[in-house]
Amino acid sequence: MVRKPRVSNYDILLRAMRELRPVSAVYGGHYREMCPHVLGRKRDRLHCLFYQYGGESSAGPVRDGSPENWRCIPVAELTALRIHEGPWHWGPSGHGGTQTCVDVVEAVAGRKTLGASLGPDAASP
């Protein structure tokens, strides 16, 4: 039996950002539907700034369109991460305009140079 190689959360998020496709995942015990906007490192850990438009959060059901739906999530803590079909959600600019989720930006949704400055070992979280 031939097994397919496991794709890392990092690679899944890069692809979603490149193709402007939403993702679903479980984080903190809650199913979430989100769009990844910024991917990078904070204190040497991979984090992603998402706009969550569906699913649940620790505060309950999520309502699309709220500026409160911006999430900074450690990439390694996402489980069941999948890209899915559906419209991209840019989200309102209510996260303050300047993101503080990551200190070293490695990718931004919609940019053609996603991951271009990364070394060969950067693909693993």
Image (cartoon, rainbow, N blue to C red):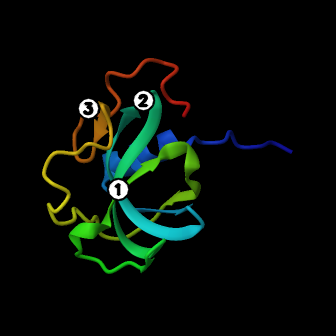
Task: Choose the circle earlier in sequence order: 3 or 2.
Answer: 2
* Residue that badge 3 annotates: 113
Residue 18's x, y, as percent? Answer: 32, 45
Q: Which residue is mark 1?
A: 50
Q: Secondary structure at mark 3?
A: loop
69 left or right, relative to 94: right
Locate residue 58 relative to residue 87 in the image: left or right.
right
Q: Which x, y percent locates residue 115?
A: 35, 30
**Residue drawn at (22%, 62%) of the image:** 90
Sequence-wise, which precedes: disc 2 or disc 1?
2
Marks 2 and 1 sit apart, C-alpha to C-alpha, by 18 Å
Q: Position of residue 60 (x, y in %)?
A: 45, 80
Near-viewer residue (37 or 110): 37
Q: Residue at x 23, y 37 (%)?
A: 112
Q: Which labelled disc corresponds to residue 43?
A: 2
Question: How far is the residue under mark 1 from the one under mark 3?
Answer: 19 Å
